[in-house]
Image (spheres, grey):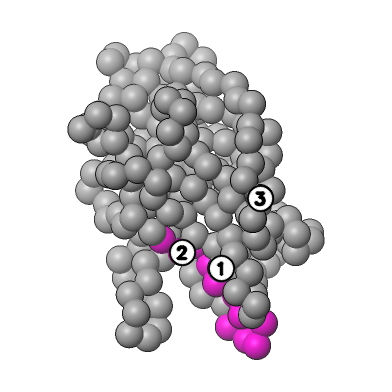
Amino acid sequence: MKIAAVVVACWVASVGHAAIVYTDIPDITIGWTGVAAIDFDRDGSPEVHVLSFDTGLGPWAWCDALEPGSRTLIDPLLTWPGSTPTYWAERPDAGALIGPSAEYQQRASLLRVQDFGGAFGKWLEFGAAHLGVEFKIGSAAHYGWIRVDLSETTISDLLVVRGFAYESEPGVPIAAGAVPGPGGAGVVMAVSVLGGARRRRWR
């Protein structure tokens, strides 16, 4: 399994006491078997990692907590068929708020594809999207997003992590895709679905 090491650049936008802290990174290609560790506050201890594993039947990708208090935004209405509980990561639209009123779990699957047929999860449309994350600095909860692209170009480029951001004020929601903007305001980074209106999916 590949573990990515990255050199980052960081931008901060302040609005009152709140600030969006955005970290740009070289693209991390996870593929079918790989992992990207995400250190929101750059303290040397990643809060979560995004990873994919080849089950032998197809890729299974998820976001997993590395520190106590770190959790991934989920869709509470989507469940894995069967007796074993599996939580599925929400895929919020750009601009949707990620905050304390949502539901989170320590591990949440993005997608699972099986070569004998069947694809599960909310991350089946090709293109760019955001994972919502709750994590703690000290005892205080903070909210952030991770930009993840689902590629249709090659199997080896299945998932690509492109950057992340968080709200520095404890307990304050962040909009999915929000980055520092002119004059210190936060603006939402535009993301597009590859292939325009086609919006192709895993099948």
Q: Which is nearer the N-term, disc 2 or disc 3? A: 3
State the image coordinates of residue 105 (x, y, percent, origin top left): 31, 57
Q: Which numbered marker is on residue 60? A: 1
The amino acid on which the numbered mark 3 sits, given as a three-letter code, is: Lys
User: Distance between the Cα atoms at labels 2 and 3?
Assistant: 19 Å
> Visible in this render: residue 145?
yes
The 10 Å Cα crowd at callout 1, few under 14, some 14 to 19, many 20 or more, is many
Residue assigned mark 3: 2
The 10 Å Cα crowd at callout 3, few under 14, some 14 to 19, many 20 or more, is few
Q: Residue at x 35, y 63 (%)?
A: 75
Kindly give the residue lying farthest to the top in the view shown: 183
State the image coordinates of residue 149 (x, y, percent, origin top left): 63, 51
Q: Residue at x 64, y 26 (%)?
A: 7
Q: Which numbered marker is on residue 141? A: none
Q: Residue at x 47, y 11 (%)?
A: 183
112 with respect to 44 (left or right): right
Q: Is residue 90 above or below residue 111?
A: above
- Mark 3: secondary structure: strand
State the image coordinates of residue 53 (x, y, percent, origin top left): 59, 65
User: Distance between the Cα atoms at labels 1 and 2?
Assistant: 8 Å
User: Distance between the Cα atoms at labels 1 and 3?
Assistant: 15 Å
> Visible in this render: residue 173?
no
The amino acid on which the numbered mark 1 sits, given as a three-letter code, is: Trp
166 with respect to 28 (left or right): left
Residue assigned mark 2: 109
In this view of the protein, which residue sits in the foreground, 190 or 167? 167
Find the magenta span and give its range: 108-118
Q: Which is nearer the N-term, disc 1 or disc 2? A: 1
- Mark 2: secondary structure: strand
Q: Given this view, does label 1 or label 3 mark the residue nearer the observer? A: 3
Q: Is residue 153 above or below residue 84?
A: above
Please say if the residues under marks 1 and 2 sit with CB atoms less than 8 Å apart.
Answer: yes
